[in-house]
Amino acid sequence: MPKLWSKTLKIFLPIAIGILLVIYSYSRFSQEQLDEIRIHFIEAKYGYVLLSVLFGTLSTVVRAYRWTFLAKPLGYRPTFTNSFLALNCAYLLNLAIPRGGEVSRAVLLDKYEGIPFQKGFGTIITERIVDLIFLLGFTLAATFIKAEVLFDYFLQIIPIKKLSTLAIIGGAGILILWLILRNTKGKIIGKIKNFLNGLKEGIWSISKMENKWSFLFHSCLIWILYVAAFYSCIFAFEQTENIALSTMLLAFVAGSFAVAFTNSGFGSYPLFVAGILSLFGVAQTSGTAFGWITWSSNMFSILILGVVSFILFPILNRKEK
């Protein structure tokens, strides 16, 4: 029963938090403002939204191709098709279970490409580390442009003291775990060490790549497409089409953090983005409509591609066999 409760909480707690954020976001608006948001949805230029979806899909294509660079140093040559399908399935599962997609992606690659789970999962962690570096790079760029605005905003919504406390506790926990693994022997400990060694091999596969510069190029291209997808939606609304590039970059960073640290940004993405845009003169109603259309169009694309990929995965691989 405790395991069942734990799994249930992992699935439904983030969704519940997202619902609460949605309720909180809309409870601030009067009926007139809610009608204004509805009008924004009706009058939006959806051609730009479709262009945003196209850029987002292209980023997934590039990401799937980039991952093959990480698998080759480990002695595996996965097909691009399976890499693309596994990535779409992972994105879909992440909508329901935070970070569950990474595990499912490694499982699918193990099943259909024969890449051991721990090694495949290690390469996926490598991808996440690279993504974090790029996100921090954009954050630094945004901070350099308008540091005081960004810091004031995040200080209002993030409990810095609590995060610092959790970081200290987490660091101490990792140190204790490392000491236990280093000085303890046993069957279970041996399995854990083998698992961690596999992760280490996957993470360090980037240093063994023959095409490091190609990997870097594709990493840059992925994030350029991310920005292009976000920037395209700016032109879907008259209220946002003339905002400065620096403002767009700040809103993009806020939205990226919402997706990275919550359940795919459900509830938090529109709230964060609207909060940033409001600091630069964009009405909360316009910013909220923009955030929801940007987020929901991306999620709709993930839903369609994910479902199709789940269906095609066994069919295409059965034909190959």
Image (tube, rainbow, N blue to C red):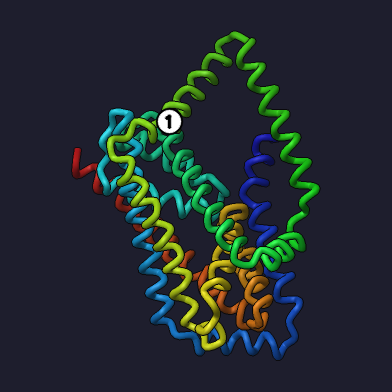
- Residue 253, how many percent across, how many down? 57, 62
- On screen, residue 5 versus residue 71, left or right, reads right
- On screen, residue 305 versus residue 286, left or right, reads left
- Give the vertical position of 282 relative to 127 (above or below): below
* Quarter placement of the N terminus: top right
Residue 229 visible in the displayed image: yes
- Kindly identify the residue that appears in the image at 39 percent across and 81 percent down: 47
Residue 57 figure quarter: bottom left
- Give the vertical position of 91 relative to 231 (above or below): above
Decide which of 242, 67 is in the foreground and name it.
242
Residue type at numbered disc 1: Trp
Neighbours of disc 1 within 10 Å: few (<14), some (14-19), many (20+): some
Residue found at the very far right of the displayed protein: 161
- Residue 210, how many percent across, how many down? 28, 35
- Residue 293, how many percent across, how many down? 52, 75
Residue 244 figure quarter: bottom right
Decide which of 86, 67 is in the foreground and name it.
67
Residue beneath label 1, please? 204
Residue 114 figure quarter: top left
- Kindly identify the residue that appears in the image at 74 percent across and 65 percent down: 152
- Kindly identify the residue that appears in the image at 27 percent across and 47 percent down: 80
- On screen, residue 278 versus residue 120, left or right, reads right
SS for dot 1: helix
